[in-house]
Image (spheres, rainbow, N blue to C red):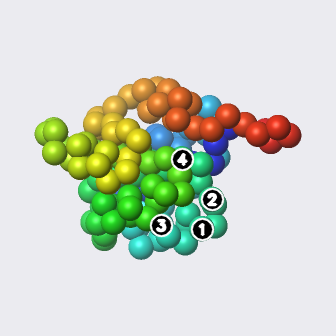
Amino acid sequence: MARVLLVEDEPNIASIIVFKLEREGHQVRWEASAAAVPAAAEATQPELVLLDSSLPDGDPFTLLSVLAPRAPVVMMTEFRDTTTPQRAREAGAVATVEKPFKPTQLARLVAQLAPAPAAGRP
């Protein structure tokens, strides 16, 4: 399964996502701070990134521009308009997910976007 970097400032939401994705066999690293993301991405070499669109300590679109060349990025947005998802895709996100979402829905999307396991890799 995939190494997933989750960037989500809300601990309750993050814990649900981590629980579900780990049950599906993914390795998940959670970061609540935008400032911690570059170092976390370097350390974990994620194969997929789940990025919250509203981080209190940084611009998620700046993070998106840094992360998208390294791994597919799914932006999770709370906004109920077409601007944020469209802007995210234009900035390099491969998909967007509108909150609230069901953990099963997100896990299905991760399974579709995560790379297939390499030979010899669990």
What is the three-letter code of the residue carrying label 4? Leu
Front residue of 69/35: it is: 69
Element on which disc 1 rests = helix
Residue under numbered circle 3: 37
Q: Position of residue 117 (x, y in %)?
A: 72, 37
SS category of the residue bearing label 4: strand
How much space separates mark 3 and mark 4, taking CA atoms?
13 Å
Tag 2 and tag 1, C-beta contact below 8 Å: yes
- The image quadrant of residue 101 is top left
Apparent side of residue 5 relative to residue 101 in the rendered image (left or right): right
Q: Which mark is residue 42?
A: 1
Does label 1 or label 4 sit earlier along the sequence?
1
Residue positioned 53% across, 29% down in the render = 112
In-front residue for pair 3/91: 91
Q: Nearer the viewer, residue 89 or 97?
A: 89
What separation in Å lies between label 2 and label 4 (alpha carbons)?
Answer: 9 Å
